Image (cartoon, rainbow, N blue to C red):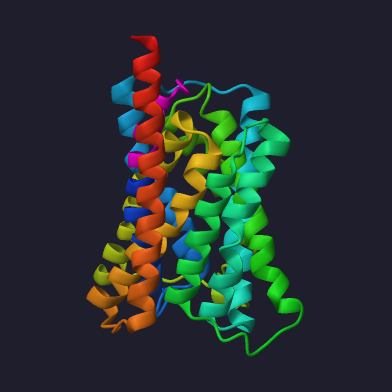
Amino acid sequence: MTDRPQSHLTGIMLMAGFCLFGPAIDMFAKLASDTVPLLQITAARFGFQLIFLIPIAIFMRCLYLPSVGEMASHFLRGFLILMATSLFFLAISYLPLADALAIFFIEPFFLTFLAVLFLGEPIGWRRVIACIIGFCGALLVIQPQYQQVGWPALLPVGTALCFAFFLLLTRRMTQTGSPVTIQIFTSIAVSLLLLPVIMLMHDGSVEMFRLKQPSSFEWVLLIGVGASATIAHLFLTSAFARAPVGILAPLQYLEIVTAALFGIWIFGDVPNLLTITGVIIIVLSGLYVLYREGKRQGASELSSA
């Protein structure tokens, strides 16, 4: 994959696509979680991804048998996203959602600095500032209260670390692999990791692991989880194939903007002045990253002319 300033703008646009569709996963999951167990929602997410992606891979002729080492990377990637999801679900059972989200959004900082350590990617002060500004905007939108402090606050920190390593692995794997096949093999890995849990817990002894026959509307919601996850993560893997981590990390805060819009549209949430201010700050931070990369691309084109 290319990693030049010309491809960075494409990566930014693809990351914006992820931030548009990513919150739709949570929206469908939230609607389904009222009546469908969390294990079933998780299994549906990755199961439907396979159903949607395999025909695409066959059409693109990019499906192949991965090596043992490559499949090990997919299992690690699948384990990380499962751990991130599980720790966050556990976190919101102890903490208010806003507090858990606010703590989780230290993740772009983890991601930016871990990319320096593990990928050797450069980091400039402007990218760190963009992360800080985006984080401030996120706090204004989320408006955490921090009424409860203690060990549960470590759970969203664990989520942030797992997701940061998940994205680092995504960045490394996309340099040689297709986004479509990466998603397929990771979905297979997650399905295999979930299978023993489903077999052991399907009897309903633990409520969140209980299986049920979904209604027609619940099937629509589960398909929505899978479809939005498929689209969002194709955008995500394609973005990390084209742009460095330091550029993409601050853009993750755009997810909060889309989530706020879904909250207004679907759940009737009414934003206050702080929420609107936070959204504006996040959007401006994202536009600054876009402006900087556009300026770099222009300079690159002039130097090569």
Quadrant for residue 196, please give it.
bottom right
Q: Is residue 246 above or below residue 42?
A: above
Seen at 64% across and 34% down, the residue is 73
Q: Position of residue 34 (x, y in %)?
A: 40, 80
- Nearer to us in this view, 181 or 12: 12
Q: Position of residue 250 (x, y in %)?
A: 49, 51
Residue 80, visible in the rendered structure: no
Locate residue 169, reporting x and y percent.
Answer: 61, 37
Up the image or down, 293 lies above or below 156; here it is above
State the residue lying farthest toward the right. 151
Location of residue 162 with respect to 100 vertically, above or below = above
Q: Is residue 65 visible?
A: yes
Q: Which residues are magenta?
A: 1-14
Q: Which SS does the magenta portion mostly show?
A: helix
Q: Residue at x 61, y 64 (%)?
A: 86
Left or right relative to 245: residue 47: left
Q: Residue at x 57, y 53 (%)?
A: 108
Residue at the location (46% across, 54% down)?
252
Q: In the figure, is residue 162 to the left or right of 136?
A: right
Image coordinates of residue 226 in percent, x first then y, are: 37, 53
